[in-house]
């Protein structure tokens, strides 16, 4: 009788954990996908890595202690998966001769026109294309930090937790990345 | 918007750069939403790094093994051919030497055999024979 009750309690706990995890997936999947898409500019790759991220998170869900937010934890997994992917890709140079990344100008095509005039919209699109070009030229770490800050709008402390860096290092990388963007945008607009 | 809210990195930004970064963010969000709402396609499977490394190492080892085996076999055959050629040349020399020795021997025997008693000495030889019978 006691073991049956314990079994039932375990089953209920398992179901609750599964429901909780399903909620996490629903809430954070678009954000993880967006970060990976902006980072890789490859839709297929972003989908694959997002899937792997949640698969890994599911396997380790029991170990998640809630010391950071679920988003920070998931973002950290996604960043590590992306790093692993680029590392593996270097080893697989003989397999991948072309990349599926979309063109940098194509990425800027997605800018909503809002209430701007056509001319202003075109100027804005050109500037956004410049930012995409700078982002593509940044180091992996700078790109990650820049995207977490200006696309995902994470606080510096959360970026530090997601990347495993100190806040000071995050600030330094961010400052360098922003300076590069500023130089590109101002340089071209002159 | 958070971009306005805090952080030292934004404090020195001019309005134009802020606007560009907001547009950049909007473009990333719009692109992501558009791709995310599409029906999901089958995803590619990426092998994990240890499998790639192991297959790469195994492939290298097999390639090196076959190349090394081929080179060794070729070298071995060449060496064998060299040894056989040297042995044949040596045998040929020995045969030639032996032939010359035999020819010398035959010539010597012929010389010895052809030495006959002159006919003028025959009576004396006969007498010597008679004396010995007495």
Image (cartoon, grey):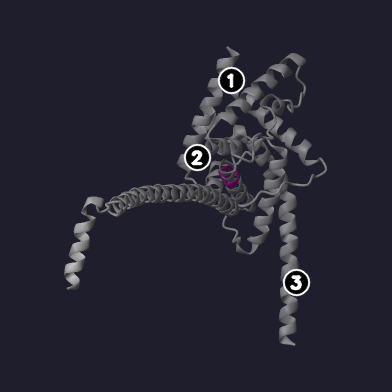
**Category of crowding for the residue at label 2, using alpha-carbon neighbours closer than 10 angstroms: few (below 14), some (14–19), many (at least 20):** many
Residue A29's x, y, as percent?
72, 48
Q: Magenta part mainly helix, strand or loop? A: helix
Label pair 1/3, CB-CB below 8 angstroms: no
Q: Is residue A90 above or below residue A51?
A: above
Image position of A121 (left or right of A61):
right
- Chain ID for label 2? A
Q: Secondary structure at mark 1?
A: helix
**Category of crowding for the residue at label 3, using alpha-carbon neighbours closer than 10 angstroms: few (below 14), some (14–19), many (at least 20):** few
Do the dots labelled 1 and 3 sit on one chain? yes
Q: Is residue A16 above or below residue A85?
A: below
- Chain ID for label 3? A
| Residue at x-position 49% and y-position 37% | A171
| Residue at x-position 50% and y-position 40% | A170
Q: Which residue is mark 1?
A: A185
Q: Which residue is mark 2?
A: A170
Magenta-colored span? A83-87
Q: Which residue is mark 3?
A: A12
Residue ranking furthest to the top: A190
Residue A143's x, y, as percent?
57, 35
Residue B120's x, y, as percent?
22, 51
Q: Nearer the viewer, residue A183 or A43?
A: A43
């Amino acid at each position: 009788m006691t073991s049956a009750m314990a079994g039932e309690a375990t089953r209920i706990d398992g179901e609750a954990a599964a429901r909780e995890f399903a909620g996490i997936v629903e809430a954070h999947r678009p954000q993880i996908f967006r970060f990976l898409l902006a980072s890789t500019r490859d839709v297929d790759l972003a989908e694959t890595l997002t899937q792997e991220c949640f698969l890994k998170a599911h396997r380790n869900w029991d170990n998640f202690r809630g010391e950071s937010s679920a988003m920070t934890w998931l973002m950290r997994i996604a960043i590590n998966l992306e790093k692993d992917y680029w590392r593996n890709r270097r080893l697989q140079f003989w397999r991948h001769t072309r990349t599926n990344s979309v063109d940098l100008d194509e990425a800027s095509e997605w800018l909503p026109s809002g209430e701007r005039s056509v001319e202003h919209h075109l100027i804005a699109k050109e500037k956004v294309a410049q930012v995409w070009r700078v982002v593509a030229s940044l180091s992996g770490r700078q790109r990650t930090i820049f995207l977490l800050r200006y696309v995902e709008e994470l606080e510096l402390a959360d970026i530090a937790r997601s990347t495993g860096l100190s806040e000071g290092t995050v600030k330094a990388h961010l400052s360098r990345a922003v300076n590069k963007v500023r130089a590109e945008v101002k340089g071209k607009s002159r | 918007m958070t971009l306005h809210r805090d952080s030292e990195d934004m404090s020195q930004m001019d309005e134009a750069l802020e606007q560009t970064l907001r547009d950049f963010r909007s473009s990333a969000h719009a692109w992501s939403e558009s791709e995310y709402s599409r029906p999901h396609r089958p995803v590619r499977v990426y092998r994990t790094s240890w499998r790639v490394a192991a297959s790469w190492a195994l492939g290298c080892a097999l390639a090196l093994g076959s190349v090394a085996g081929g080179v060794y076999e070729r070298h071995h055959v060449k060496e064998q051919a060299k040894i056989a050629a040297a042995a044949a040349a040596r045998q040929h020399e020995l045969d030639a030497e032996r032939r010359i020795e035999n020819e010398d021997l035959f010539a010597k025997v012929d010389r010895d055999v052809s030495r006959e008693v002159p006919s003028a000495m025959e009576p004396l030889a006969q007498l010597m024979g008679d004396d010995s019978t007495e």
